[in-house]
Structure formats: structure tokens, C-alpha cells
Amino acid sequence: MKKLRGLCVLDVDGTLIEEEVIDLLGKEAECEEEVALLTAQAMRGELDFEESLRKRVSFLQGLSVDTFDKIYHELHLSKNAAQFINTLQKNQIEVGLVSGGFTPIVERLAKDLGISLFAANQLEIRDGHLTGNLIGPIISREVKKETLVSELHPQS
């Protein structure tokens, strides 16, 4: 087993990928404008991230989980992202994804890119459809930082 020489943790939406997945989900749920407005306000720091995320997710109630497969195929990796990750991995630098996005997309990106570390928000699903709620802790800026620190300094 190779000894790791470092850790690089990447955000996903608007960083690893060009798109904001919540906006694509909003389009599929026919509430694109409302979701995009809340996303823009949250990105500018005008709204609390957790409150904004919960509101945006509530608009997605009833959306089929099959939508994630469609959206995944519409995503575009940022320029040179795959090469960057490959270079890090070849140089024994662990890569992780910590995202305010959603597990169905982030987990699939991680798998396709050979990344084993990831954290994202979990959507509540019932009978194959989104309930409009989230499960578990929200992956906020603070949680992203805590995740990075815990990976750098694991408890003995």
C-alpha cells in the first residue's frame, strides 16, 4: 500500500462540475426560477445556507429519483478536473469531495473518478420520489471545514 503524501478536498457544484445540481433539479420540478433565485442569494451570502437549502429542496417534492440519472448525464466536469484528480492520485494525494449538493450525484461522481472519500446532503426518498426533506446533518461551509480537518488529523 502506498503511503499518502497529502489530501485535496474539492467542492462539487460550480467547482468540480460546471453546473449547480439543485438548479437542474429545480428545472425538472418546474420551479427553476424560484430555486435559481434562492441559490444565487445563498451564494452571495444574502440567505442562510441551511435555511435556503431546505427551502429549495422543498420545491422538489414529488420528483422521481430517476431524475438523478438524467441529470448526471447532463453534467460537465470543469476543464482539466479529471486530469487534476488523476495527477493528485498518481502522486499519492488522497482526493475527497465534500459538497452541499446531494449524495446521488456526488457518490456517482466519486465512483467514476476513483474517489473514496465524499460527503453530501442526503435527500429523503419515499416510494421512489423526493419528499422535499433532507435527512441528517446539512453539509454547510462549517461541516466542510470540519470534514477536512478530521481527515487531516484523525483521532487516534
Image (cartoon, rainbow, N blue to C red):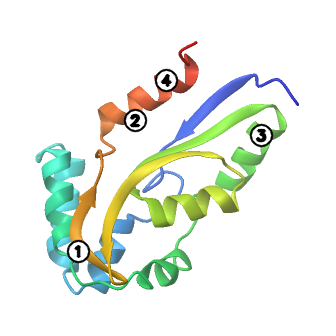
Quick one: label 4 or label 2, which is nearer the N terminus? 2
Residue 62 left/right relative to 34? right
Mark with earlier residue (4, 1): 1
Q: Nearer the viewer, mark 2 or mark 1?
A: 1
* Amino acid type indicated by mark 4: Ser
**How far is the residue under mark 3 from the one under mark 4?**
20 Å
Quadrant where the N terminus lies? top right
Task: Determine whether 37 is above or below 138 in the image.
Answer: below
* Residue assigned mark 3: 89
Answer few, some or many: residues within 10 Å of disc 2's Cα (few below 14, many 20 plus, some between 14 and 19): many
Q: Hey, what amino acid is under mark 1?
A: Thr
The mark nearer the N terminus, 3 or 1, is: 3
Read off the residue under disc 2. 144
Under tag 3, what secondary structure?
helix
Kindly identify the residue that appears in the image at 45 percent across and 60 percent down: 103
Q: Which residue is mark 1?
A: 131
